[in-house]
Image (cartoon, rainbow, N blue to C red):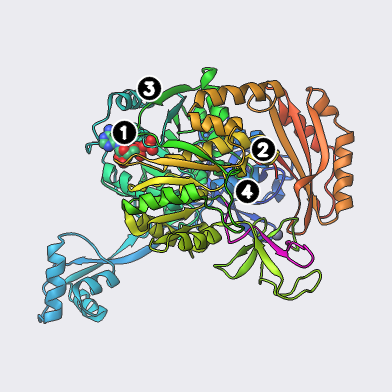
Amino acid sequence: MTPSFYDEGALVAVLTTQPLDRALDYKAPEGGCHLGAFVEVPLGPRKVLGVVWGPGKGDYDYAKVRSVLRVLDAAPMRDEMRAFLKKAAAYTLTPMPAMLRLATRAPGLGDPPSMRKVYRRGEAEPDRMTDARRRVLEFLGEYGDLAFTLKELAELSGVTSSVIKGLVKQGAVAEEDSPRDLPFPPMDPSRPGKALTDDQARASSHIAGAVRSGAYGTTLLRGVTGSGKTEVYLEAVAACLASGRQALVLLPEIALTAEFLKRVEERFGARPAEWHSGATMTERRRIWRMVGQGNAQLVIGARSALFLPYQNLSLVVVDEEHDTSYKQEEGVLYNARDMAVLRASLLGAQVVLASATPSLESWANAESGKYTRLDLEARFGPAVMPTMATIDMRAEKLPSNRWVSEELKRAVNQRLERGEQAMLFLNRRGYAPITLCRACGHQVGCDQCDARMVEHRFLKRLMCHQCGETKPMPTVCPSCEAEDRMAPVGPGVERLGEEAVELFPDARVAVLSSDMYGSARALKAEIETIAEGGADVIIGTQLVAKGHNFPSLTLVGVIDADLGLQGSDLRAAERTFQLMRQVAGRAGRAEKPGTALLQTYQPEHPVIRAILAGDEEGFWRAEAAQREAAGVPPYGRMAGIILSGPDVAQVFDLANALARNTGPLQRVGAQVFGPAPAPIARVRGRHRVRLLVKAGKGVALQSAIAQWVGQVRLKGDLRLAVDIDPQSFY
Ligand code: ADP
Ligand code: ZN
């Protein structure tokens, strides 16, 4: 057994966040250290963060081994967390230091909790009372024992800070130190929730019971948008909090959930901890520490919230579990949904996967009995599923540069007359996807990537959606130098917005696209204004498909339902199905019934027909049968290997070397496809080549791949990334 404490001088192995291939030996510091302790260790001339990972290896001259510099003021990493990081690393083939970086993504972890001065009513009376002094003392008197910062107190009582300082000198106001990282206010799970319907109550008591059991389990909670999935899992969260344990709710687009946070706050009487990329450094540090001390009971977060140091996590909800943003596509390539299940299984915790349109993976796991499946059949209250119909675009004679059909236009006008909202959905950011020279046909591309530049009129630039590179709109063709012949081709949401303004001159048109707002906060505010009726026609990308509530929205027009059906992606059909269902689910959330109209050139396509028929089980069964026949996920395993480098010949040489020596893969019966240029063959100036590995379901794929890629050495600037269970094939 690994000892849990090391006395001063004992050899310990310390895992650091530095890219080394092993944990390094150090001597335990004065006072010793616990297994899992967060420590600072010397590495060359630097001091780096690390975790005591176990006993030292002892393969070094003891006299030369350096000592741990200090143990940081943070709860040691728990055994369960270390086990989780190890398993996650083994699954995703990620080096441990990168895993540890994910688990310590908060700055200043090692700092002592910084203090700040706060002020409250003191014992003494001032020698002389002035108006200003009286205001301060009366204000403090009103608030009993509450403490305020100098700035707050000065502002709230309307005096200058020197008045307060004067009162401090006389003892009439007390000055104290208080830690900056304050615990989160306690949640009150006993506040009454909504009265649940029978269906909802059955689902929520099932999950709550499972949480209380202290055993691992995963539940797929399926129900159309508006059926009350959120209400159901909030009750399970309440049961979890009531038993004194922690809960985590993962959401795809945390920045956009003002409405959701308000609901949570109403339910539990206090704001939960919010973990997302927009959180400030100070907020991050506070959450990381408080989660570790058990002083944050409920975390609402984006995928990396899964790597916080929970003290007693018992419930993880993954809302919109099918959402592609759960897969991190850069750095550590992990799927937060799958890692949530892994972490919960190690902890004896429950996972709830909520979705109106589950991923085929989760659907299959429920079919095979690995997950429990709970269905909410009806929408809550009078809201009903929208009526859906296609508009056959082959029959429409639209003038060029118009995308809204006559039929859709009529439907929008009807809504406007009734004072309701309509949404036009197009999953394309920017003004136009292509900028073309009318003289020579040249299309403006990115200099760094094999991608077209997309015009963003709002930003007055062309932008590459691969690397983010921008350049000004050219007036002269970069190829034939013809002047003023550059023209936009095809629609983006900005251009659709222009069309809507022309078609509906009396309507207030709002375009919702992530790049049109300076910050997530601004976008969030805009969405709230619109939900409250601040616009009549809403134009949006897939952002709007993610869980916002627009009570007076009764029509959704999908401009190009075929968009997602193109491409060679394994999951193209599934994605289109999900997206269309989600978008359609925006319509008619409140009392008014909704309609969804899908513009398509292939109304007889099986996916389009399944969407219209609302035949989800039918769609899944057909999709599952196809994938099973092809031996692809979830009925087989896949991994992508992406090699990249500045020199295309070198990258291919490496890829060919791998493709020739597939011994370790053959031994487990895995096949290799490629090498081939990746669909986007150049990103940020690096050439990308990919190999695809396919194997049977029960195969130990990771160890075979590790052996296989371990045969080659990466010279110079060449890089190799392994993507287990790839989601996107770019
Ligand atoms: P979902 O998460 O499935 O989209 P929600 O939980 O957001 O559904 O519910 C949709 C709407 O219906 C919300 O405004 C919610 O407050 C309301 N609602 C759902 N169930 C109930 C209930 N039992 N009592 C009152 N309101 C409910
Ligand atoms: Zn680019």
Q: Main secondary structure of the magenta part?
A: loop
Distance Cα–Cα, label 2 vs label 3:
34 Å
Residue underneath mark 3: 213
Mark 1 CB lies closer than 8 A to ligand 1: yes
Residue underneath mark 1: 380
Answer with mark 1 or mark 4, whichever residue precedes in sequence: 4
In the drawing, does residue 340 fall left or right of residue 118? right
Distance Cα–Cα, label 1 vs label 3:
29 Å
Q: Quadrant of ligand 2?
A: bottom right
Q: Amino acid at mark 1?
A: Phe
In the drawing, does residue 70 fall left or right of residue 245? right
Quarter of the image for the N terminus: give it: top right
In the drawing, does residue 157 fall left or right of residue 471? left
In the rendered image of this protein, does residue 466 appear above or below residue 241?
below
Query: Foreground: 56 or 471?
Result: 471
Answer with mark 2 or mark 4, whichever residue precedes in sequence: 4
Distance Cα–Cα, label 1 vs label 4:
50 Å
Query: Foreground: 429 or 721?
Result: 429
* SS category of the residue bearing label 1: loop
Q: Amino acid at mark 4?
A: Thr
Q: Position of residue 177 (x, y in %)?
A: 31, 63
Answer with mark 2 or mark 3, whichever residue precedes in sequence: 3
Distance Cα–Cα, label 1 vs label 2:
36 Å
Q: Is residue 205 visible?
A: yes
Per the rendering, the mark at residue 726 is 2
Distance Cα–Cα, label 2 vs label 4:
28 Å
Mark 3 CB lies closer than 8 A to ligand 1: no
